[in-house]
Image: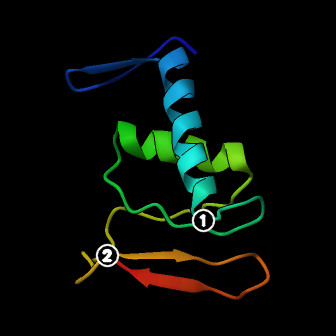
Amino acid sequence: MGEIISGERRLSSEDLNARASRAATGLASLGVKAGDLIAIYLRNDLPFLEATFAAGLLGAIRPRSTGTMPRPRRAICSRTPAHGRSSSTPT
């Protein structure tokens, strides 16, 4: 892959892989695993790409969404496994 450029920021493919691996470790510590449906609510920028790659490393499913979603009144960390049960924790 080479280099990813976003504004003034540059990220090599090696750095992206390392950052995504660390993010995947964090997601796994929250209980995210293969087959889980997760939502990533970030601006379309490098952190979004890192989180998307992290989900892929774990085998989690990130449904397609757009950046036009309304801003939430409070942040919710929600994990919905493919079998339909969910858990939420207000933050």
Q: Earlier in the sequence, mark 1 or mark 2?
A: 1
Say which quadrant the N terminus sits in: top right
**Residue 87 to residue 14: above or below:** below
Query: Disc 1 to disc 2, how far (Cα)?
Result: 19 Å
x and y percentages locating residue 66 in the rendered image: 41, 63
Q: Is residue 19 left or right of residue 28?
A: left
Residue type pointed to by label 1: Pro
Quadrant (top left, top right, bottom left, bottom right) of the C terminus: bottom left
Above or below, 12 relative to 54? above
Residue 6 placement: quadrant:
top left
- Which disc is residue 51 wearing? none
Residue at mark 2: 75
Residue found at x 71% / y 49% = 58
State the residue lying farthest toward the front: 29
Q: Outermost residue, bottom direction? A: 85
Residue 25 in the image, given as x and y percentages of width and height? 59, 45
What residue is drawn where x is 56% and y is 62%? 64
- Marks 1 & 2, CB-CB < 8 Å contact: no
The one of 90 and 46 positioned closer to us in this rendering: 90
Counting other residues with Cα less than 10 Å from the Cα at mark 1, is it few (<14), some (14-19), or many (20 or more)? few
Towards the viewer: 71 or 54: 54
Check disc 1 and report its element: helix, strand or loop. loop
Q: Residue furthest top?
A: 2
Front disc: 1 or 2: 2
Circle 2: residue type: Ala
Q: To which residue does mark 1 refer? A: 63
